[in-house]
Amino acid sequence: MRYAAVLLLLLGACTTTYQTPAPVEGPSGTPPPVARQENVAVAGLMDSARSDAAAGRLGSAAATLERALRIEPRNPRLWHELAKVRLRQGDYSQAESLAARSNTYAGDDRDLRAANQKVVADARAARGR
C-alpha cells in the first residue's frame, strides 16, 4: 500500500494541471474552460532542444524534439520547433513538411500559423522557389 502511494505521488509530479482563461461568453453561453494537461517532461525537452539549437547543436536539438514528439505527437509547437531546426540544417523540404504538419494541429493559433508560414517561405526561398 505504501509503495502504491509513493508511485501515485511520482506519477502526479509528471504533469501539471492549469486552467485556461475563461472565454467571453456569447448570448447562448459558452461551456466552462477545460483543464489542459501540460507534460513537464515535454516542456523540459523543449527547453533542452532550444538551448541546443541556440548553441548550434542542431543534431542534438532535432533528436530531443523527436523524443518529445514520441510523447506528444499532436503538439504543434514541437512540430514547429523541429521545422525550424531542419530549416537551419538546410533540409528545406523537411522543414516545409514539418511546418505544414504543425499547422494541422495548430487549430486557430494565428501566431503559430504565421510562424509556420514563415518557415515555409524561408525554405522555399532557400531552395530558389
Image (cartoon, rainbow, N blue to C red):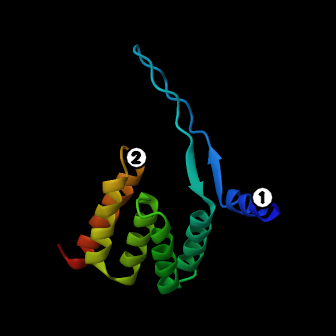
Q: Nearer the viewer, residue 15 or 27?
A: 15
Residue 116: percent from the left, percent from the top? 35, 60
What count of labels does the image hold? 2
Give residue 109's mark.
Answer: 2
Q: Nearer the viewer, mark 1 or mark 2?
A: 1
Q: Residue at x 78, y 62 (%)?
A: 6
Considering every residue shown, the one lying at the far front of the view is 1
Q: Which quadrant of the structure image shows residue 124? A: bottom left
Separation of marks 1 and 2 at Cα, in angstroms: 39 Å
Q: Nearer the viewer, residue 39 or 120?
A: 39
Give residue 42's mark.
Answer: none
Tell me: residue 115, above or below residue 51.
above
Residue 54: percent from the left, percent from the top? 56, 76
Q: Nearer the viewer, residue 1 or 120?
A: 1
Question: As shown in the figure, which amino acid type bears the numbered disc 2?
Answer: Asp
Q: Secondary structure at mark 2?
A: loop
Q: Residue at x 27, y 65 (%)?
A: 121
Considering every residue shown, the one lying at the far right of the view is 2
Question: As shown in the figure, which amino acid type bears the numbered disc 1?
Answer: Ala
- Residue hosting label 1: 5
Q: Secondary structure at mark 1?
A: helix
Residue 74: percent from the left, percent from the top? 40, 59
Q: Which quadrant of the structure image shows residue 117? A: bottom left
Q: Earlier in the sequence, mark 1 or mark 2?
A: 1
Q: Residue at x 25, y 72 (%)?
A: 125
Q: Nearer the viewer, residue 3 or 60?
A: 3
> Where the N terminus falls, by quadrant?
bottom right
Tell me: residue 68, above or below residue 25.
below
Tell me: residue 35, above or below residue 30.
below
- Tell me: 123 left or right of 66: left
Considering every residue shown, the one lying at the far left of the view is 129
Q: Residues within 10 Å of mark 2 (few under 14, many from 20)?
A: few
